[in-house]
Amino acid sequence: MIKIQVKNQFKILVMISCGILMASCNKDKRKVASATSNVKIIEQAFEMPGLNRNRKLRLYLPPDYEKSTKRYPVLYMHDGQNLFDDLTSFVGEWGIDESLNELYKKNEFSIIVVGVDNGAEKRMNELSPWMNSKYGVAEGKQYMEFIVNTVKPYIDNHYRTLTDRNNTAIMGSSMGGLISHYAMFEYPTIFSKAGVFSPSFWFAKEVYPFSDKRKLLDNHRLYYLMGGDEGQDTVENMDVMVASLITQGVNSESILSRTVDGGEHNERFWRSEFTKAVTWLFR
């Protein structure tokens, strides 16, 4: 039987609380808008069926989008407020736009990124398909249905995308890592790639039997990442998941699992690892 370590959840929640405190203490240190010119907010309130709330989308278009006619792969990401702009971020941005613009300059690597804003106080509920008695109801199923049935069709209809699963990926961190892992196994005909950063597997032990029962299609890629300073329990939880997937027959060459010494549970760490992850997923 798989054993999941949960005691480190306290450490992670303390990190989050400290982040809130630091943000409050540094409120005089004003943030400035940092999104590049090829990032836009889609000015439409997207209704989330089953959740009775709306959501905002943020969009990164490659530097060559306006001067070409080609179609692009798409990466869907969670916590849209934290991806592109320091002004809207919680305690720092991922710098997705700067990283991808630099990749384009180096080798013309180009993808579209769709950032789905989080639901603030609803975030933990929305990003887990499984109930946690301490943190409230599970809304992850409806959240992913929203991405698959509302967001993706809108993006595919309004932008030049490559719509097939081989060109569609999903990525997130912490609770966003949990829901990205879930998405790969729940929607294998939609997503062929997932970036699972600092996944909160401690939040829902049901993720293990769920993953054991699901089968991935061919040509999938899974990138797991954890920081060495996020706690031994969280590292072990990720390692157990990866080992379980390989045991059940997932091709080990389709999984990359990394634990980075000194890595912490924050956007600065995820930002530093994004380029490695996205180029491996789309290679």
Image (cartoon, helix red, strand yellow):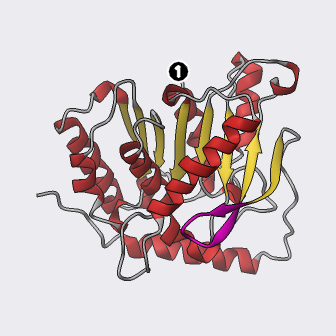
Magenta span: predominant SS is strand
Residue 57 painted magenta = no
Q: Can you give x and y, in whole percent of width and height, for residue 73 in the image?
A: 62, 28
Q: Which residue is mark 1?
A: 283
Q: Amino acid at mark 1?
A: Arg
The answer to whether residue 30 is above or below residue 246 is: below
Magenta range is 46-55
Q: Residue furthest left?
A: 1
Residue at (38% x, 62% y) in the render? 231
Residue at (18% x, 61% y) in the render? 3
Q: Is residue 157 left or right of residue 143?
A: right
- When asked about the image quadrant of residue 141, the answer is bottom left
Q: Can you give x and y, in whole percent of width and height, for residue 38 in the image?
A: 84, 38
Q: Is residue 178 left or right of residue 126?
A: left
Does residue 92 appear in the picture of this structure?
A: no
Q: Is residue 231 left or right of residue 236?
A: right
Task: Please state which of residues 170 and 223 is positioned toward the viewer in this rendering.
Answer: 170
**What element does badge 1 sit on?**
loop
